[in-house]
Image (cartoon, rainbow, N blue to C red):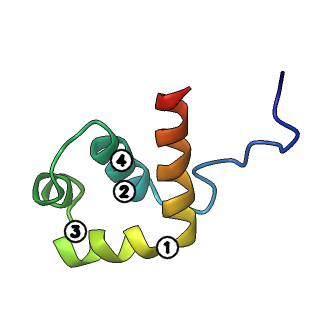
Amino acid sequence: MASAEPQPKATVGLSGKQITALAMLASGEGTIKVAAHVGVDRVTLWKWGKLPAFQEAMDGIKRARID
């Protein structure tokens, strides 16, 4: 049975770098490697992790892996 709530667009409002970072983090890459790959400082990556849109997208990835 389908969920009553519609699934939000996980990456709406995120930049290309943020989407790349999400994919890499979800695949198990470390934060230092991810930050270097997308061209940002580790602190920036940490700040992104505090953004509601970033958290929602990461939660969606985690839920998809559980289902």
Left or right of 16, for residue 36: left
Neighbour class for label 2 at 10 Å: few (<14), some, many (≥20)?
some
| Mark 1 element type | loop
What kind of residue is marked 3?
Val
Could you say where residue 17 lies in the image, as x and y percent from the top left? 36, 56
Sequence order check, earlier mark of 3 and 2: 2
| Residue that numbered label 4 is attached to | 20
| Residue that numbered label 3 is attached to | 40
The residue that appears at 52% across and 50% down in the rendered structure is 59
Outermost residue toward the right in this view: 4
Estimate the spatial distance between the alpha carbons at disc 2 and disc 1, rounded to whole Å: 14 Å
| Mark 2 element type | helix
What kind of residue is marked 1?
Leu
State if disc 2 and disc 3 touch (CB < 8 Å): yes
| Residue that numbered label 1 is attached to | 51
Q: Quadrant of residue 1?
A: top right
Left or right of 61, for residue 46: left
What kind of residue is marked 2?
Lys
The residue that appears at 34% across and 42% down in the rendered structure is 26
Q: Which mark is residue 17?
A: 2
Estimate the spatial distance between the alpha carbons at disc 3 and disc 1, rounded to whole Å: 16 Å
Estimate the spatial distance between the alpha carbons at disc 2 and disc 4, rounded to whole Å: 5 Å
Could you say where residue 8 lies in the image, as x and y percent from the top left? 72, 49
Neighbour class for label 3 at 10 Å: few (<14), some, many (≥20)?
some
Sequence order check, earlier mark of 1 and 4: 4
| Vertical position of residue 37 compared to residue 39: above or below | above
Of the two numbered discs 1 and 4 in the rendering, the one whose residue sits closer to the viewer: 1
Q: Give whichever of 36, 5 is nearer the camera.
A: 5
Sequence order check, earlier mark of 2 and 1: 2
